[in-house]
Amino acid sequence: MQTRRYAPAAAALNGKLYVLGGYVSEGGYPYQILPTVEAYDPTTDTWTNKASMTRARFAHGAVTLNGTIYAIGGNSTADGAALASVEQYDPVSDTWTNKADLPTPRVSFAAAVVNGNIYVVGGVIGNTAVAGVYIYNSTSDTWSIGANIPTPRATLAAVVVNGQILAMGGSIPGAGGTSRVEQYDPAYNVWSSELDMPTSSRNECYAAVIGNTVYVFGGYDNYTMQSVGVQPVLKIFTAIELEFFTETNKVYVLQASPDLVTWTNFDVFLGNGDFWRKLYSTRGQSRLFYRVVPSQ
């Protein structure tokens, strides 16, 4: 892409891929929240800048409906101010138009289109999961509220299969990732439980439908990481600043390791629903790797 970005939204329209918003962090805080949009043409393998959204946003949703793209909700500031705003992109005029707001702000949700309506599923406001399904009618430019999802969660994946919405994976505030799969029937406004995914949890996963098969890929499991081979450190610093997003009243343990195999507790702190940051001296230390894990 022409602009590197974290947590954007994407939608396909008329054979092109549109990437909307996100943020850039040049090694520090606050982030630069982006309103910019670019489109990828696979026939020419090129990216083109398009008209920016009226609001900068990240961790939002994007769907294609009636030859246009809708950008929905998300975060508008680095400290997590949630958005309720919705806007529509017309590729012919290359313009954005504001539409009716969501009933409440929402972040890190999934969105899908069924029978000409937009369905917004899951997500959070602050550290509280949103249970109600929001349903947008493009003809009347209005939102209504559907049945609560049985497992409120954020950063989930959703796809449409045979007119049904499958909600898969994600994270439950205070409980970590989940492998749960639940199905929503828009015609009857009801949810049903489906078979869990084989992986114990998939937080921030993605999904796609090809033929009659649903593919779920990526994500991570309860903040745990797998070790990977690393190259020798080429730069020597006398201090290191660590940063990690925390959940309110959750205890976290900072651990250190010389080899990514043996880990020892290094520090303990209490989460506050925001980013935890601390500067540690490394003068005179051998090389260490660090990780933060929830206390068991």
Image: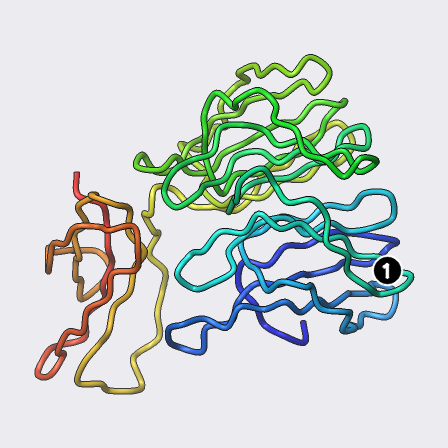
Number of marks present in the image shown: 1
Q: Is residue 253 above or below residue 289?
A: above
Where residue 51 appears, as percent x and y from the top left, is: 76, 69
- Assign a secondary structure to mark 1: loop
**Residue at the image point whose x is 22% and y is 45% from the top:** 294
**Residue at the image point whose x is 81% and y is 43% from the top:** 65
**Residue at the image point whose x is 11% and y is 54% from the top:** 268
Q: Quadrant of residue 97?
A: bottom right
Which residue appears farthest toward the left when viewing the image?
Answer: 284
Task: Describe residue 239's horizontal placement relative to residue 190 as left or right.
Answer: left
Where residue 58 appears, as percent x and y from the top left, is: 55, 58
Which residue appears farthest toward the right when viewing the image?
Answer: 92
Disc 1: which residue: 91
18 or 232: nearer the viewer:
18
Quarter of the C terminus within the rendering = top left
Q: What amino acid is labelled 1 in the image?
A: Pro
**Residue at the image point whose x is 53% and y is 27% from the top:** 132
Quarter of the N terminus within the rendering = bottom right
Where residue 78 appears, as percent x and y from the top left, is: 43, 64
Q: Quadrant of residue 15?
A: bottom right
Where residue 77 appears, as percent x and y from the top left, is: 47, 63
